[in-house]
Image (cartoon, rainbow, N blue to C red):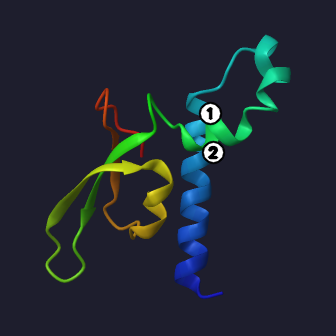
């Protein structure tokens, strides 16, 4: 595996861990959370739809990609990447 792929995989894993930490449930509901792990990973905030702001490689300009699923951030390079919830506009990453 190349260094870029490993770095991206680590970046996505840390982003998912941060999102899980933000949406952590109270201790009473932890036993029910074991069945909902797949849903929680895909729903980062509100409905799981995000806007992604990223920097262009050649011109270093900021571009926006609207209404993307959370799991689509793996297709973007982490340099200058910003992710916002499409509903509440809260910065997720």
Q: Which residue is mark 2?
A: 17
Estimate the spatial distance between the alpha carbons at disc 2 and disc 1, rounded to whole Å.
6 Å
Mark 1 = which residue? 21
Q: Residue at x 73, y 38 (%)?
A: 37
Could you tell whether 68 is left or right of 32 in the image?
A: left
Q: Position of residue 20 (x, y in %)?
A: 62, 36
Is 23 displayed left or right of 81 in the figure? right
Question: With respect to residue 11, does 7 lie above or below?
Answer: below
In the foreground, 57 or 88 = 88
* Residue closest to the far right: 31
In the displayed orientation, state which residue is furthest to the bottom: 2
Q: Nearer the viewer, residue 48 or 19?
A: 48
> Dot 1 lies on which element?
helix
Quadrant placement of the N terminus: bottom right
Q: Nearer the viewer, residue 7 or 35?
A: 35
Residue at 57%, 84% in the rendered image: 3
Residue beneath the point at 51% across and 54% down: 71
Q: Residue at x 19, y 83 (%)?
A: 58
């Amino acid at each position: 595996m190349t260094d870029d792929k490993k770095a991206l995989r680590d970046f996505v894993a840390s982003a998912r861990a941060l999102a899980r930490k933000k949406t952590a449930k109270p201790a009473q509901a932890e036993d029910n959370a074991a069945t909902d792990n797949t849903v929680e990973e895909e729903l980062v905030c509100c409905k799981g739809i995000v806007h992604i702001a990223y920097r262009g490689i050649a011109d270093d300009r900021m571009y926006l990609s609207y209404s993307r699923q959370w799991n689509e951030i793996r297709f973007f390079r982490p340099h200058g990447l910003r992710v916002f919830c499409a509903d509440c506009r809260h910065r997720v990453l």
